[in-house]
Structures are given as structure tokens and as C-alpha cells.
Image (spheres, rainbow, N blue to C red):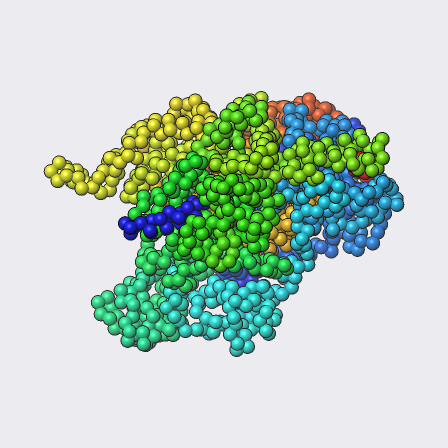
């Protein structure tokens, strides 16, 4: 990466040249502190027996029908890696009917009591990140208070799927055009066994999404007559392509793994013991190996009397719980041997016990803190908290926030800062910890001054705008505060409705084309500046002279109070006091009255009444903020748009700039951290127990976090010219730097090292390829193998690679450094036994084939990696690998094939126009594609072996059968491309396309086989994965909103972004292209913006530093403006009119900006270069002649294009309204370009144990074990918080899942609390306008409405719709969901006119993206009919309901439940219209028309349907019929496995 070895070799040559030169309350927000709502408790009506669903012959299952979901497909998956993909919600959980009233449709009384308990309560404590982490860690390990109260009532009704022999049933379900296989878990009710508290749990039905393509033919014949009738015929598109995820279902393997691999702890894949008994055999009841999935928490249950016709409720839960964490886990080695009885999965070697996680809380206790001179207070802490972390907590606590220099003592003994609290002798519950003030040092005084500065600026968003101190924006409380929806909605008066602010702004209404930017960052009242001091700065008398140092003086400060009183303050070892110095007279003696305070805040409070009053008010506002708004994020999030703010005096900022520490540890000023030793030392920590793994992963995460921050600051300093290069005599693009013990190189070709691969373009791409390789090896985490800390920073058009330094590498020359690999593309190749042993451990999970190459002496050399991978033994004795750009196999579609190799190109590639010439030859395949291809080949392997084994098993003897079976396995291995002839094992040779690599003659056949395998996976990408991406989009299992989410959707299928041109050509071939308009629009935008980014990178490299603002604004004008006006020379602030008039006589000493090369760029020239770049790089032809034509043709938004280009290039523009349509004036001025931020890519570390827990929780939830799933996710949340902190994408995902489970269980207070934290975390870690944030706002709105807060729900939906309009525009399926929800909420608030506007727009959007004959379109008609009914306009209501009935009748028949309900509703409307007409005919009578207001339970039920949560019921007879069918299917499957 940047080829650090080549850099060092170049440096050595250069140097050899002769010419060289409070607890509890803080977790609740004002959202949960409102008055108890008086709205009617929502309860869903009980369905009659006729309405029960069934999958028996001739019946239809409404749970499996798309019409029950208005827009259920627009739901986000939750992947801890941060990648965002929108997926379908289709998992069904069966719960008992008794629980129906307590779940989605009815809030519990305890939940309302919990809400009242937090009424009008702010935050009484100031918390740092450490305190919040501790509280989250403790709070999620046990039940919440509301849960504990209802547990005795609901423990026997928990949603739980218990396993018994013969209970695994599989059904095929096709939803939204996707043929899916589901696993049905039914429990026999005739037996009762000893199972403790779980004995009375009701039966459950859990549908799970399983990709078993090999069994579709077997199952479809059974289910087709039952399920397919329930589907919308217009939406039936079969998707038989396998999933691209790591743990997909493998054909023939009865595993229970869904979309991702699941830890072996939860599910054991057991094909069978050689047992000939069918699963229903009584003698086999105890043999649980007959059940393909064994859940450790599941126990047997006795059967109940089947004569009792009990009903059960089926919940459809979105696939939040099906998308496993996006963590690179090696594929379960199910392909090792087809003969193994038990197939081990990764994770067997490290068992995770839930009791270990629970034990983390057992050491928690409450301490009593005694600050000096104040009353003591209680503080709840975690036993694993360090004393130093407790120190940070107290520095941010409301009572002790002004103290920084103190020690903690227990029983008169000072505590060690690095010790855990639980290890301190005498530490117990209610222990008294005394805060003892310590003497200051210069370092302590500077830290104290910085802390005071942070307190004074705690409400100022300037740090978030400027992207410093890990601050970022959050606006959730702006929309949730002041929520007082306690009035009865049905009795609300008109005046009250007007004051409630229910009407949205004009720009949110459907059809509005305005996209204002100012609402993106609304002005918050709590952000209004509270100025405590006019000036706080360092005195010019610093540093103290020697005689004053002898008196303890450390430094001097100047303060100007709000009373305009100048103060000169001395910071001494004992504290702070006023001195007698003035501006021009130095007198360090104490001033009268002599006041000595240990804290600067205390001193200022005594001498300035205004400071005391204002600081107290500031503290009150600060503690009222949610903790998630105050704590720092682990990584800096930059906003692409910011308000213009005044630049204020800041002594701390000025001092940090003058001292130029720039990224070095502030606590050790003047010292540099040894980053390599820290990172490698963390990796060497013990990992045996859970505590050791947590400590190790926490250390790795925090060290990497600090490394990324230092690397980012160093890269910016390098580009700004503030770091001296190691080789100043070289050309600028060849210079290298060392700063803060980090090595920096630029993304250019040094000494033509990358010329065989593509020159500078290859050098630029090599950095990202190397980073991906480092991430892959870090994920495998082999003990004893070390990689470098790596970060890639793009800043101002230059790519900077920051790496840790291998000890001793700068002292060696090239020959001495590399002991493994090659530094000259195969001319000299080295190998080393130690590296071979270590890399051999990584070759299997990374699918790398060990191979031999020839060195310069034609001697075979064995390698277990790409030839460019270099192994270096550092002076510390550690083996390091670097330059990992060939970790993944090359993409032959974008290589430079030899003429004789073109004959190997598959037809699939030739039809699509591949192979194509690419800018560089470093194009590689993604790991997701590799795993999908391996899964695909494994299915073929199983088919070949199983079919041929069945054919030969009838007539052969046992010995002959075993012999022929081995031959069959050998043939199957050869057919699928396995590197072994005895088991399935696919690997790739990364060097088959590398230039200059030579192979031994005896390996020619293997190399050809590897090259064919490479072409097979390239053809697989074109024939399977790209159609799978389009299928995902067509079926709305993936609904991208911007370029980032589109990229995530492609990557999850293993498709690189360079295939965008192919995707656009495939889109043109889709018959129903209208349903994919949003995909086409986003794809074209992505091609244009990425092409413009490539041009912008080279464009900025020729810009002088003084012209950055003008150059960037000029580029944006050429790209987005409709004006053709050139940049005015007056934009140069150094050119005045007076000087211009005298230019002839005096000459030009300051060059005009318009004379630069960048200023001569025109819109037509830029557009021509974009078209050329799109054709060369993405192989897509843009037919339009200008950007205006493209925007008009594809309905693009200029504001969305501005957002995309700003995010991708690091541009920050000013927050104002931009007029893009002006033909006479450029859109952007130089003042509009506020800043440029670095775009940083780095390694991502996470908690592996927590990831496994989330995977287990997903399996539990899919089986209906809601309580178990809740507990597992809570434990995962504890571990994630402990490792990564509370502001992290993984923690956000856990909150999102917990909120959904709590909502399903009817625990609305807890659901609100969890989802609120998820929203704040999304805003802080991903951005206020990220699509994930939009989704989190949407579901928080749903939970608010269910909790009796419709006004807050409405404001949240308005915010979500505004963000969606800004990101992607109104023509998008996401808008249909939001409009439907807005219409329903407004209908519940009796705002019928507004409701009609949104519902009518939802109707049009649904017609476009789902078709006018779709069942979702019928549902939209029904919603409109209900609103018209409430208005009394029965004619329009009848028209819409008739349309809905017509669609139901044509699609599912008149006997379908939906058609019956529609017909019943039509009769009701007709009757009401007759009654109304009679009232009009008898106008003199006093009989009013009976128009009932909408019922909140009905509104909530429709909202749940819109969001993918549905309630259906099954009778005992229907369950028995289903059980009989799936038992037969299981018996057939079992017998087939017995034969194998």
C-alpha cells in the first residue's frame, strides 16, 4: 500500500546520493417525559373463525399475501458493519391468542406507568462516554422495570418455539415475487414434559427464510396450490439465485442458517446419525439428531388437548432479525468432507457462555462520592470500570465537572488509575470514595484550561460544523421535546388543532418542487450561545520567569468578564488566583482580596457575578441534553453543509495551533506514541476467556481509533505543507513523510513501480486494495501474524496512505527487508518457512491456494499469498506482512488477457462485452462474491454426489458402493473445481493474472484449471449476481436511496461498482422498467458523480492553495449550474479596483485567479470529460449533450447531486438556499465553499463475541423466541458498548432490534427508549441525512403513535419525508410508505384534508412501483375510502372501495378474506350514504348524520400493516393440517439423507 518497501528503497538511494539534502435519569429523554396519553388503548378486533388463515388444500394464508403489507419492503436491515440495505420483512412469529391484546395492538398499563414516572424529568447528571457505556452495559443485562412488572403475568405466554422430534417442517413461501422456503416449527400439544417455567408456553409457528434451491422442486408441488393462490399475480417473479452472504443454505444440507452463517453454539448442523428410523418413530423420540436444528435454549413440551380450538396470533416481523452482522466470518467448513457425520462450523473452538456475559453485571455496585467542600452523592458504576474511567466520569458530572486535578481515595489509600474497581481491596457497595485535590503541573493546568473551555462551549455546535473533537450533529430532541399529546384526540377543538402545529411546511407537501436546505439544520433554542466570558486567553507574560517558577507559577491567563472587568490570573501548583499584572506591567503578586481556588471556575464565580449566573444556566441546559448528544463519537463525522458562524476567540485552539502538536497525545505533550508497538501489543493480549477477549478487543478498538485520528491529522498536515518530507529533493508526488511515528506516502507511482499495472491509476487503487487485504487478515486474526495499522485519506485531490512503521525497516535496504514475496513482480522471489506456516492458516478462510512460482534462477518457490505480498521480520522479532493488494483473486473481466487466453472467455462474459480494457490491472473480486460462488458450487457438488449415490446404492454391495462413492466424490470435486480430490475445497490462485509471474512446467495444468475457475466466477457474477441485484430491487428487498446505499446493495451481492454500466444496460432489458425508475435514476447519478470525482481529483492537483475556494466553486458551477457565466476576476480578494486601474503602470504582482488553468474549465468541457470517463471506466454511454438534458430526461435533483459530490470529495458548502435555474448568475460563489474535509477509510474492529450473540438472537427471533432474542441482543449490546462505546453502528443496530422486539411485545415505553437511542446514534455516527437515519425516524414515529403521542409521531414523519425528498426526491418507493403513514396519522388527528393529500400521492406512487392491479394498490384505495368516509363524502369513498374490491376480486377471488372484508365495508358505506341522504331529505328534522370518527386502534392496525407487522390467527385444526403436511415432507427429506 503505497509500497512501503519501495518507498524505503527509494529513500535509501536518495540518501546515498552525493547531492542529497447521575445515574438512571440520564438515559431518558424528554420524549419519554410527557404526560400520560388519554387516547384509547389500541386493540385489534378479534377475527371470527371464518377469517382464520390456513394453508390447507383450497385455503389461502393471508399472512403470506403482499396485500397485507402496504409497503413492508422498505425496511432496513441492521448490519454492524454500517452497510445499509433495505430488505423485505417476512418472518412470521406465532404467539398465543391470550397475548394478542398485550402486544402490537395494545399498550400495557405498566408501560404507561413507566412513562409517567419520567414525566417532566430532565437529566440530573452530566455523563461522559464512559459513564454512558457503563449504564448501557448494566441496563441491558437485566429486564427493565416495566418488563419486570409484567413478567409474572406473561412468563407463561412468552413467544417461544420449543423443539421436539419431528417438529421441523418446511414450506415454500413466495412473497413480492420471490420464491422462498420457510421452516415451520410446530409443537405437539399432547405431551407434557418437565420443562420448568416453559411448560405452559403456547405453541408457536415460525417461518424462516431459507435459500434451499435444491429442494424447491420437492416442496413446490406440495405448496403451490396453497400459497401461490395468495400471491399477487402481477408480482410473481421467481428468484432462484443463491444468496451472496457467507452462510447461505447449502443444497442438501438440512441446516437452519438463513442469510448469514450462525454460530455453532446455537445451531448444530447434523445431517444424521446413520439411523434408519423416521423422525416420527416413537422409539426415536429422544434422538434429537433427527431434527436438523438444535437450539440449546429449546426444551420439549407436552401436548395439550387438540380438541380445544385455541387460536394463535401470527406476527410478521421485518427481516431486521434475518440480516446477520456484516462481519467477515469464514464460511462454515461444511465442504471439508461429504462423509462427515457432524459438520463443524467456525466458532467451535471458542465457546461463548451467556453466564459469562451475565457475570459482567454481578460486580456492579453503587459508590458514594465525596467531593471536596460539597455533599456526597451516589454513583452507580460497573465493576470492570477502570479508576481512570471513573475519574473521567466525575470530570463530567454536574457536581464535580469543574474539577480535573484530583485523586480518588478509599479508606485513605489512593487508587491506581489503571486498576479495575472490582479488584480494589475494600471496594464494595456503598463504599465512600473521597475526591482529594492534587497539586497542578503545567500539563495539568493546560488540561484544566481545555476542560473549562469545553464546558463553556458545550452548547455550541461549532465543533460539529468544523469537524473537530469527534463532535457531530443531532436534531432528534428538536422534534420530540414539548410533547404533550395528553388531550383526547376525538374531543380536540379546532383552536387546539391549530395551536398544535399539525400542518406541515409547504416544502413537505406532495407535489412541491422546492428543496430548501435550511430546514436540514434547524436552529435549536438550546444551542443559543450563553456567553459567560468575553475573553479567556493566554497572557503575553508567559512563560513564567525562573524566579516565579520557584514560587509555583505555571502560566498566566487574561480574562475579560461580561462586566468588562480585566482579570490577570496566575495558575500555580496550588490553584488559581488573581495577580496584579496589567497589559504593560508585570506584577505577579496576588491581588486583593487574596482568593485562591483550586478550580478556575470557582475563582471566576467568586469574582464575576455574571459568570456565576450564566455558567449555572449553561450547566442546567447541558445536563438536560441527552447523553448521546454530548459524548464524543469514536470517529469524526463530517457534515457536507454547515451554517456560517462567527469566528470567536479561543485560547485553547490558538495554543494548540502555536505549539503544533497536531495530533500527538495531548496528555503527553511533546511525546510521540509508538503506534506500531501499541497496535501489535494489543493484538498479543490473551484471548482465552470472555473478559480477556473483551479487554483485548477494547484495546484494539481504542488504539485503532486514536491511530485513525492521528493519521487523519497527519495526512492533512502533509497536504497543507506542514510536514517536512524525508526526500525534499524529489518531485512532490514522490515525497514521503514521517510524522508522529507514522509513515505517510502519496498515492502516486513511485519510481514507476506500478507501471506494469497501470501507473498512477494503479497506485491510487492499490491503496484501497491493500486496505481491504489488511481488513481480511485482521478478520481472520491468526495469532503470530502481524499487519500494519493502515488508513487511507483523500484530501484536496491527493490520496495519502498512513501506516505504522515496521521496527527497523528504515535501517535496512531492499534486499535485507523482504524475506517473503517479491518486490519486483517475480524477478526475485523469496520464501520463508515461518511465513508459510502462518499464511497457511489464513489460506483456507481467505480461499487462497498455495502455489509455486519460479524465481530468477528458475527455482520453484512456494507461496501462500499473492506474489506482491511481502513478509518482513522486524527488529522486534515479529513477522509482518504488507502490500496486501492481491489478497482477493483478480477480476478477469477487467484484466489485460493475452490473445491465447481469449479462447477461455465464457459465453456469458463475451455476450456482455467482456473482457474489457481497464485503467489498471488491480481490479479484484469481492469476498461476498467468492462466498456466493463457493456456495453455488457446493450445491452442485452435493447434487452430483447425492443423485449418483442414490442411483448406485440399489444394486451394489457395500464395499463396492464405498469404492464407487469415493470415485464419485473425486469426479464431483474435479467438476466443481475443488483443489482437493477427496473433499470440497475451492480456492483461488491470486497470481494467475499477475504480470511477470512464471509457474513451473509441472504446474501448467493446475494454472489452467485455476484460470478457468477464475473465468467461471466472472461469468457467475454476470449471469447470477447482477440479475440477483436487479431481482432484489424489483422485489423491493433492496431499496437504495442514494449512491451509498446502492453501493451497499451491490456489495452484498459481491458486485463491484465498476459494473454500474452493465447494470444500467441490464436495466434497459427489464420488462417492467417503470418499477425500477429509482434504481436507474440513482445508478445514472452515481456514474456521473463518480466520473466527476475522478476528474475533480486531478483538477484540484493543479490549484494553488490561495485559490481553493474559487476553484471548487468554479467546478461546482460547471457541474451543476445552468449558467454559462465565467468566474469573475473580482472573486480574487487580493485584486481591488484601484489596483486594477493602475495595472498598466505598476504591473501585476499578484496573478489573477482567472489566469489559472482551472479557471479556464467550461461546463461543456467538463461534461465532455464526464462522458468520456463514464465510457472508459464504467463502460456506459451517456447520450445527453449536457447535464441539464440528463437532469430533465431522468428527473434528477441538482440538490441531490450536490450532496453526493460533496460527500464523496469532502466539500463543505454553506447552508443557504441555492438557485440552480438561474441562467445569468452562477449558483456558487467562493464564500459558499466553507471547507474541505478529508475522506477517511480505515480498518474496522468490533466485538466478535457480541457478533455471535446477535447471530444467535436472530435465530431465536426467527423461531419465535422473542424473550430469548431480547436477552441475547441485550447481552450483545453490553459487549458492543464495552468494546466500541455507545456511539457505534453495532450498538445502534442492537438498539434498533431491541426496540422492534419491545414493540412487538407491547412494551412501548422501552421500544421508544431503545429506538430513540438508535436515532441519535445514527445521526451522530452516520449523519443527520443518512438513509439509515431516515428509516430510524420512521419507526420511532410508529412507536410514538402506538405510545399515544400522535403529534410527536407526525413531526418525526415530517422530518423523515423532508430528508427523503432531499436525498432522493419524491419519486421513490420510500415516499409511498411515508405518505401512507402520514395520511394515517393525520386521519387519526382528524386532519382529513391533509391526510387526503398524502394518501392520494401514496396511491399514485403505489400504482407506479407496484402496478394498478396489485394488492398494495387496493390497500391504498381502501385507506382513501376510510378518510372519505370520515369526511362524509360517501360517493368518493364508494368509488375507492369499489376499486379495491375490484382488484381483490380479480386477483384473489370473491371468496378471499380480503375480498370479503372489502365487500362488507362496501355495504357499510352504502348504508351510511343512505342514512346521510335521508338526513338531507328530512332537513327540518333534528336527526344528525351519523359519521363516526376514526378509531385509534384501527389506525394503529393499519400503520402496523404498512410497516410490515401483521396479526393473523390459526385454529388448532389448521395447525394440525399443516403439521401433517410438513411431517410428510420431513419424512421424505429424512429418507433421502439416510440413503446418502
For residue 1232, above or below residue 1420:
below
For residue 1405, above or below residue 1331:
above
Q: Position of residue 381 (x, y in %)?
A: 57, 64
The residue positioned 59% from the left and 73% from the top of the image is 425
Q: Position of residue 784 (x, y in %)?
A: 56, 55
Q: Is residue 937 left or right of residue 1285?
A: right
**Number of marks drawn:** 0
Q: Can residue 1069 be seen from the camera position used here?
A: yes
Q: Nearer the viewer, residue 291 or 187?
A: 291
Name, please, the residue furthest toward the left.
1145
Q: Is residue 1182 left or right of residue 581?
A: right
The residue positioned 18% from the left and 42% from the top of the image is 1149
The residue positioned 37% from the left and 68% from the top of the image is 442
The residue positioned 82% from the left and 42% from the top of the image is 274
Quarter of the image where one finds residue 1134: top left
Q: Quadrant of the N terminus?
A: top left
Amino acid at each position: 500500500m503505497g509500497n512501503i518497501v519501495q518507498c524505503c528503497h527509494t529513500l535509501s538511494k536518495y540518501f546515498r546520493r552525493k547531492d542529497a539534502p447521575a445515574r438512571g435519569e440520564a438515559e431518558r429523554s424528554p420524549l419519554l417525559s410527557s404526560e400520560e396519553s388519554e387516547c384509547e388503548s389500541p386493540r385489534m378486533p378479534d377475527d371470527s373463525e371464518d377469517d382464520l388463515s390456513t394453508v390447507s388444500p383450497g385455503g389461502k394464508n393471508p399472512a403470506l399475501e403482499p396485500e397485507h403489507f402496504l409497503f413492508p419492503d422498505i425496511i432496513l436491515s441492521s448490519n454492524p458493519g454500517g452497510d445499509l440495505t433495505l430488505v423485505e420483512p417476512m418472518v412470521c412469529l406465532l404467539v398465543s391468542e391470550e397475548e394478542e391484546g398485550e402486544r402490537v395492538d395494545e399498550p400495557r398499563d405498566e408501560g404507561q406507568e413507566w412513562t409517567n414516572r419520567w414525566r417532566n424529568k430532565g437529566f440530573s447528571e452530566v455523563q461522559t462516554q464512559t459513564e454512558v457505556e457503563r449504564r448501557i452495559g448494566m441496563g441491558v443485562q437485566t429486564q427493565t422495570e416495566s418488563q419486570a412488572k409484567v413478567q409474572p403475568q406473561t412468563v407463561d405466554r412468552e413467544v417461544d418455539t420449543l423443539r421436539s422430534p419431528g417438529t421441523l417442517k418446511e414450506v415454500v413461501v413466495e412473497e413480492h415475487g420471490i420464491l422462498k422456503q420457510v421452516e415451520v416449527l410446530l409443537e405437539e400439544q399432547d405431551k407434557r414434559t418437565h420443562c420448568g417455567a416453559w411448560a405452559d408456553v403456547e405453541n408457536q409457528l415460525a417461518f424462516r427464510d431459507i435459500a434451499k434451491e435444491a429442494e424447491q422442486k420437492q416442496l413446490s408441488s406440495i405448496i403451490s396450490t396453497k400459497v401461490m393462490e395468495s400471491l399477487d399475480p402481477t408480482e410473481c417473479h421467481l428468484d432462484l439465485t443463491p444468496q451472496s452472504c457467507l452462510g447461505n443454505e447449502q443444497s442438501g444440507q438440512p441446516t437452519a442458517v438463513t442469510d448469514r452463517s450462525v454460530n455453532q453454539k446455537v445451531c448444530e448442523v447434523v445431517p444424521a446419525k446413520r439411523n434408519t428410523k423416521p423422525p416420527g418413530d416413537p422409539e426415536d423420540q429422544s434422538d434429537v439428531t433427527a431434527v436438523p436444528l438444535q437450539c440449546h435454549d429449546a426444551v420439549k413440551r407436552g401436548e395439550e388437548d387438540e380438541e380445544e380450538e385455541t387460536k394463535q396470533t401470527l406476527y410478521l416481523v421485518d427481516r431486521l432479525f434475518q440480516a446477520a452482522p456484516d462481519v467477515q466470518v469464514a464460511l462454515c467448513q461444511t465442504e471439508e468432507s461429504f462423509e462427515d457425520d457432524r459438520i463443524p462450523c467456525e466458532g467451535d473452538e471458542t465457546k461463548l457462555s451467556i453466564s459469562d456475559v451475565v457475570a459482567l453485571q454481578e460486580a456492579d455496585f453503587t459508590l458514594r462520592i465525596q467531593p471536596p467542600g460539597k455533599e456526597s452523592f451516589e454513583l452507580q458504576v460497573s465493576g470492570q470500570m477502570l479508576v481512570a474511567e471513573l475519574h473521567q466520569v466525575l470530570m463530567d458530572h454536574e457536581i464535580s465537572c469543574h474539577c480535573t486535578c484530583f485523586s480518588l481515595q478509599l479508606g485513605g489509600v489512593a487508587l491506581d488509575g489503571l486498576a479495575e474497581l472490582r479488584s480494589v481491596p475494600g471496594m464494595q457497595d456503598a463504599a465512600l470514595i473521597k475526591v482529594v485535590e492534587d497539586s497542578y503541573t503545567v500539563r495539568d493546568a493546560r488540561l484544566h484550561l481545555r476542560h473549562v473551555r469545553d464546558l463553556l462551549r458545550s452548547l455550541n455546535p461549532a465543533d460539529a460544523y468544523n469537524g473537530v473533537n469527534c463532535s457531530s450533529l443531532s436534531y432528534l430532541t428538536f422534534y420530540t421535546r414539548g410533547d404533550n399529546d395528553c388531550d383526547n384526540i376525538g374531543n380536540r377543538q379546532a383552536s387546539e388543532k391549530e395551536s398544535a402545529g399539525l400542518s406541515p411546511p409547504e416544502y413537505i407537501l406532495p407535489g412541491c418542487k422546492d428543496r430548501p436546505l435550511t430546514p436540514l439544520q434547524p436552529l435549536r433554542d438550546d444551542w443559543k450561545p450563553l456567553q459567560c466570558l468575553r475573553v479567556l486567553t493566554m497572557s503575553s507574560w508567559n512563560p513564567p520567569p525562573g524566579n516565579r517558577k520557584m514560587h509555583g507559577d505555571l502560566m498566566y491567563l487574561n480574562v475579560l468578564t461580561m462586566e468588562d472587568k480585566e482579570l490577570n490570573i496566575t495558575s500555580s501548583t496550588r490553584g488559581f488566583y488573581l495577580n496584579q499584572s496589567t497589559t504593560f506591567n508585570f506584577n505577579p503578586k496576588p491581588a486583593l482580596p487574596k482568593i485562591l481556588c483550586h478550580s478556575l471556575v470557582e475563582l471566576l464565580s467568586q469574582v464575576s457575578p455574571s459568570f456565576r449566573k450564566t455558567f449555572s444556566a449553561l450547566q442546567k441546559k447541558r445536563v438536560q441534553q441527552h447523553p448521546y448528544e454530548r459524548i464524543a463519537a469514536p470517529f469524526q463525522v463530517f457534515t457536507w453543509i454547515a451554517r456560517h458562524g462567527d469566528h470567536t476567540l479561543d485560547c485553547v485552539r490558538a495554543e494548540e495551533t502555536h505549539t503544533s502538536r497536531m495530533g500527538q497525545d495531548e496528555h503527553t505533550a511533546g511525546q510521540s506514541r509508538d503506534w506500531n508497538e501499541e497496535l501489535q501489543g494489543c493484538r498479543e493480549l490473551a484471548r482465552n476467556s470472555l473478559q480477556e477477549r473483551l479487554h483485548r478487543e477494547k484495546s484494539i478498538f481504542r488504539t485503532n481509533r486514536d491511530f485513525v485520528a492521528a493519521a487523519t491529522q497527519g495526512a492533512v498536515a502533509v497536504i497543507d505543507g506542514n510536514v517536512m518530507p524525508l526526500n525534499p529533493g524529489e518531485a512532490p508526488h514522490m515525497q514521503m513523510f514521517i510524522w508522529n511515528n507514522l509513515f505517510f506516502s502519496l498515492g502516486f507511482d513511485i519510481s514507476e513501480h506500478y507501471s506494469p499495472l497501470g501507473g498512477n491509476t494503479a497506485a491510487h487503487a492499490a491503496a484501497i486494495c491493500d486496505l481491504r487485504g489488511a481488513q481480511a487478515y485482521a478478520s481472520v486474526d491468526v495469532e503470530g501474524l502481524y499487519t500494519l495499522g493502515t488508513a487511507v485519506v483523500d484530501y484536496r485531490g491527493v490520496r495519502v496512505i498512513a501506516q505504522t512503521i515496521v521496527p527497523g525497516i528504515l535501517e535496512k535496504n531492499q534486499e535485507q527487508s523482504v524475506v517473503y514475496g517479491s518486490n519486483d513482480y517475480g524477478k526475485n522471489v523469496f520464501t520463508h518457512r515461518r511465513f508459510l506456516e502462518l499464511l497457511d492458516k489464513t489460506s483456507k478462510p481467505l480461499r487462497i491456494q498455495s502455489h509455486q512460482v519460479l524465481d530468477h534462477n528458475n527455482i520453484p518457490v512456494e507461496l501462500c499469498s499473492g506474489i506482491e505480498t511481502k513478509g518482513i521480520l522486524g527488529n522486534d522479532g515479529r513477522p509482518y506482512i504488507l502490500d496486501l493488494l492481491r489478497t482477493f483473486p483478480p477480476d478477469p473481466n477487467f484484466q489485460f488477457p493475452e490473445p491465447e487466453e481469449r479462447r477461455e472467455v465464457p459465453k456469458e462474459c463475451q455476450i456482455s462485452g467482456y473482457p474489457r480494457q481497464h485503467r489498471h490491472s488491480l481490479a479484484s473480486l469481492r469476498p461476498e462474491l467468492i462466498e456466493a460462488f463457493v456456495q453455488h458450487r457446493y450445491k452442485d457438488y452435493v447434487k452430483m454426489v447425492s443423485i449418483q449415490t442414490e442411483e448406485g446404492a440399489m444394486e451394489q454391495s457395500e464395499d463396492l458402493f464405498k469404492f464407487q462413492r469415493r470415485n464419485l466424490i473425486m469426479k464431483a470435486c474435479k467438476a466443481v473445481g475443488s483443489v482437493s480430490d477427496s473433499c470440497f475445497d475451492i480456492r483461488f490462485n491470486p497470481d494467475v493474472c499477475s504480470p511477470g509471474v512464471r509457474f513451473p512446467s509441472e504446474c501448467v495444468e493446475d494454472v489452467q484449471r485455476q484460470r478457468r475457475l477464475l473465468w467461471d466466477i466472472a461469468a457467475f457474477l454476470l449471469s447470477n449476481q447482477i440479475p440477483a441485484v436487479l431481482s432484489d430491487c424489483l422485489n423491493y428487498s433492496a431499496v437504495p436511496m442514494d449512491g451509498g446505499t446502492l453501493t451497499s446493495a451491490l456489495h452484498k451481492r459481491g458486485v463491484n461498482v465498476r459494473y454500474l454500466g452493465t447494470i444500467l444496460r441490464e436495466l434497459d432489458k427489464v420488462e417492467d422498467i417503470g418499477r425500477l425508475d429509482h434504481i436507474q435514476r440513482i445508478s445514472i447519478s452515481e456514474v456521473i458523480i463518480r466520473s466527476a470525482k475522478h476528474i475533480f481529483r486531478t483538477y484540484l492537483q493543479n490549484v494553488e492553495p490561495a485559490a481553493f475556494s474559487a476553484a471548487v466553486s468554479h467546478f461546482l458551477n460547471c457541474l451543476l449550474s445552468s449558467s454559462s457565466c465565467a468566474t469573475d476576476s473580482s472573486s480574487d480578494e487580493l485584486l481591488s479596483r484601484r489596483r486594477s486601474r493602475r495595472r498598466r503602470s505598476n504591473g501585476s504582482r499578484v496573478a489573477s485567479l482567472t489566469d489559472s488553468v482551472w479557471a479556464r474549465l467550461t461546463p461543456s468541457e467538463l461534461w465532455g470529460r464526464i462522458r468520456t470517463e463514464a465510457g472508459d471506466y464504467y463502460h456506459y454511454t451517456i447520450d445527453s449533450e449536457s447535464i441539464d438534458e440528463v437532469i430533465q430526461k431522468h428527473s434528477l435533483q441538482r440538490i441531490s447531486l450536490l450532496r453526493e459530490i460533496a460527500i464523496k470529495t469532502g466539500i463543505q458548502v454553506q447552508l443557504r438556499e441555492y438557485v440552480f435555474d438561474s441562467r445569468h448568475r452562477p449558483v456558487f460563489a467562493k464564500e459558499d465553499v466553507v471547507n474541505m474535509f478529508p475522506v477517511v477509510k480505515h480498518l474496522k474492529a468490533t466485538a466478535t463475541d457480541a457478533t455471535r450473540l446477535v447471530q444467535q438472537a436472530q435465530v431465536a427471533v426467527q423461531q419465535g423466541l422473542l424473550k430469548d432474542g431480547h436477552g441475547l441482543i441485550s447481552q450483545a449490546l453490553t459487549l458492543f458498548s464495552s468494546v466500541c462505546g455507545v456511539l457505534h453502528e453495532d450498538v445502534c443496530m442492537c438498539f434498533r432490534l431491541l426496540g422492534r422486539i419491545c414493540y412487538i411485545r407491547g412494551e412501548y415505553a422501552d421500544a421508544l427508549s431503545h429506538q430513540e437511542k438508535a436515532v441519535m446514534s445514527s445521526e451522530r455516527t452516520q449523519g443527520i441525512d443518512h438513509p439509515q437515519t431516515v428509516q430510524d425516524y420512521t419507526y420511532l414515529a410508529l412507536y410514538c403513535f402506538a405510545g399515544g403521542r400522535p403529534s410527536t409521531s407526525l413531526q418525526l414523519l415530517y422530518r423523515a419525508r423532508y430528508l427523503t425528498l432531499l436525498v432522493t426526491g419524491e419519486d421513490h418507493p420510500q415516499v409511498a410508505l411515508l405518505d401512507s403513514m402520514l395520511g394515517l396519522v393525520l386521519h387519526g388527528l382528524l386532519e382529513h384534508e391533509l391526510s387526503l393529500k398524502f394518501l392520494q400521492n401514496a396511491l399514485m406512487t403505489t400504482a407506479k412501483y407496484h402496478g394498478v392491479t396489485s394488492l398494495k394498490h387496493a390497500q391504498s384505495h381502501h385507506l382513501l375510502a376510510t378518510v372519505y368516509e370520515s369526511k362524509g363524502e360517501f360517493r368518493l369513498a364508494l368509488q375507492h372501495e369499489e376499486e379495491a374490491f375490484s382488484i381483490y376480486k380479480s386477483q384473489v377471488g370473491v371468496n378471499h378474506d380480503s375480498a370479503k372484508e372489502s365487500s362488507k365495508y362496501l355495504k357499510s358505506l352504502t348504508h351510511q350514504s343512505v342514512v346521510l341522504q335521508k338526513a338531507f331529505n328530512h332537513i327540518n328534522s333534528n336527526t344528525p348524520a351519523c359519521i363516526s370518527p376514526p378509531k385509534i386502534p384501527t389506525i394503529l392496525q393499519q400503520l402496523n400493516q404498512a410497516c410490515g407487522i401483521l396479526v393473523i390467527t390459526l385454529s388448532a385444526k389448521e395447525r394440525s393440517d399443516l403439521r401433517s403436511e410438513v411431517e410428510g415432507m420431513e419424512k421424505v427429506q429424512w429418507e433421502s439423507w439416510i440413503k446418502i
